[in-house]
Amino acid sequence: MRIPPAFDQPLPTCKPAYGKLWLIGGTQESVEIAAAIANYNIRCIISVTTSAARSLYKPAPCLTVWVGRLTFAQIPEFVKQQEIVAIVDASHPYAVEVSQNAIFSAQHLQIPYLRYERPILSPSTASEGEHFDSFAALLSTNRLQNKRVLLTVGYRPLHLFQAWHDRTTLFARILPSAIALEAATQAGFTPDRLICLRPPISDELELALWRQWKIQLVITKASGKPGGEDTKRLVATQLGIPLITISRPTVNYPQQTCDLAVALDFCRQYL
């Protein structure tokens, strides 16, 4: 990874009493962390990528929500301006680039970093259905051929399925955002093959949607309970529909936890 010039600039020494925590958010677990640290009056800036995500966080005097996309080269200036003294990464498990940029930046700028990773479903539950290590591994097979397939994988991977529109009937559920809708349209999905919903989605609604579209196969990600993975497994079992899960990408986190108490101890240690 090439080091941008910004990383070679000296950073001011931030005293913990005046510094801030950087919470990389946009997920349900980041909302829980933000609420918890607000109770301790820890100064925190929460970064999210969309304006819609801003509304997830309850206002608090010590919390600031920053909306935008930080590139690798922009992080040093962000850290300097915001007086960041510690990072808690609660981004989505599949936001690999976000985490990798944060890890490298933390190491180079000598800032403590903690990954808050949402729990993986228990082995007894996660053993249900089929699993593939990646979308590429799945699409190298004919598993989707001539089926009515529902994609619940977010909007980013939809372009990978574009070549399959003439070999199968694809449906996609995406977030109700302009960027998601544009990506789905560019990937060849017509309005009658899309539904825009914001989680959480109840068992009843999930079941009704699959029945309405006469779904024969569902593809999801190992996004855990916050991503509705448990609901999809339940409905798949009830309807006897195969569920294919794309495994989480492997990231070498220097320090991680799925325990909120551990994350809070980390925050209190540095702020």
Image (cartoon, rainbow, N blue to C red):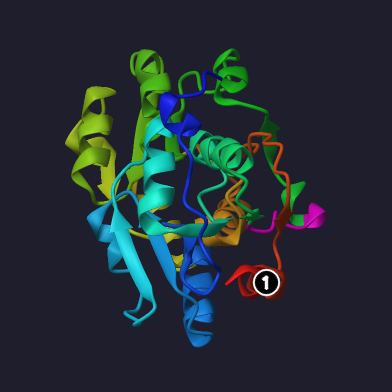
**SS of the residue under disc 1:** helix
Residue in view at x 74 percent, y 55 percent:
125
Does the image show residue 197? no
Residue in view at x 26 percent, y 29 percent:
189
Which residue is at the front of the view, 100 or 224?
Answer: 100
- The answer to if 120 sits in the magenta stretch is yes
**What amino acid type is highlighted by mark number 1?**
Gln
Residue range highlighted in magenta: 118-124
Quadrant containing the N terminus is top right
Does the image show residue 161? yes
Which residue is at the front of the view, 9 or 91?
Answer: 9
* Disc 1 crowd, CA 10 A, few/some/many (<14, 14-19, 20+): few
Residue in view at x 32 percent, y 64 percent:
65
Residue denoted by label 1: 269
Q: Compared to 222, does 15 lie above or below? A: below
Residue in view at x 72 percent, y 70 percent:
262
- The answer to if 240 sits in the magenta stretch is no
Determine the main secondary structure of the stretch shown in magenta.
loop
Quadrant containing the C terminus is bottom right
Q: Compared to 52, does 111 lie above or below? A: above
Q: Is residue 106 left or right of residue 163?
A: right
